[in-house]
Image (spheres, helix red, strand yellow):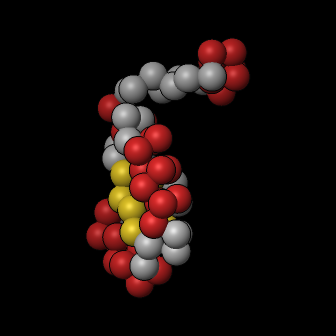
Amino acid sequence: MPSWKEFKKTGRVSHDEKIKRLGLLIVDDEKQIVDSLGETFSSIFEIYTTDDPRKGLELFKEHQPKII
């Protein structure tokens, strides 16, 4: 896993499988924001997105992402 120091220096993270498996849950009531963030981070993390808070809770329980 890349270090914080490496990230600060390069502004990038390697596309390591360990990072991808962390999972990122994006919940916002504005679909455009959800879509934009999902697209931005999809090459780095396994992405779970929704604009519905109830669905967000379901996705969290089902996938247990480490980043929300």
Q: Residue at x 52, y 69 (%)?
A: 30
The answer to whether residue 23 of the structure is visible from this angle is: no
In the displayed image of the protein, which residue is found farthest to the front?
32
Q: Quadrant of residue 11?
A: top right
The answer to whether residue 33 of the structure is visible from this angle is: yes
Q: Residue at x 39, y 69 (%)?
A: 50
Q: Say above or below: 19 vs 34.
A: above
**Measured from the top left, where is residue 18 in percent x and y?**
38, 35
How many numbered marks does the figure carry? Answer: 0
In the displayed image of the protein, which residue is found farthest to the bottom?
54
Q: Residue at x 34, y 47 (%)?
A: 46
Q: Nearer the viewer, residue 24 or 36?
A: 36
**Measured from the top left, where is residue 54 in percent x and y?**
41, 84
Q: Say above or below: 12 vs 61.
A: above
In the displayed image of the protein, which residue is found farthest to the left?
62
**Measured from the top left, where is residue 14 in percent x and y?**
45, 22
Say whether residue 43 is left or right of residue 8.
left
Q: Nearer the viewer, residue 40 or 16?
A: 40
Say whether residue 2 is left or right of residue 7.
left
Q: Say above or below: 26 vs 57.
A: above
Q: Residue at x 42, y 55 (%)?
A: 35
Q: Say above or below: 34 vs 9.
A: below
**Measured from the top left, where is residue 23 in percent x and y?**
40, 50
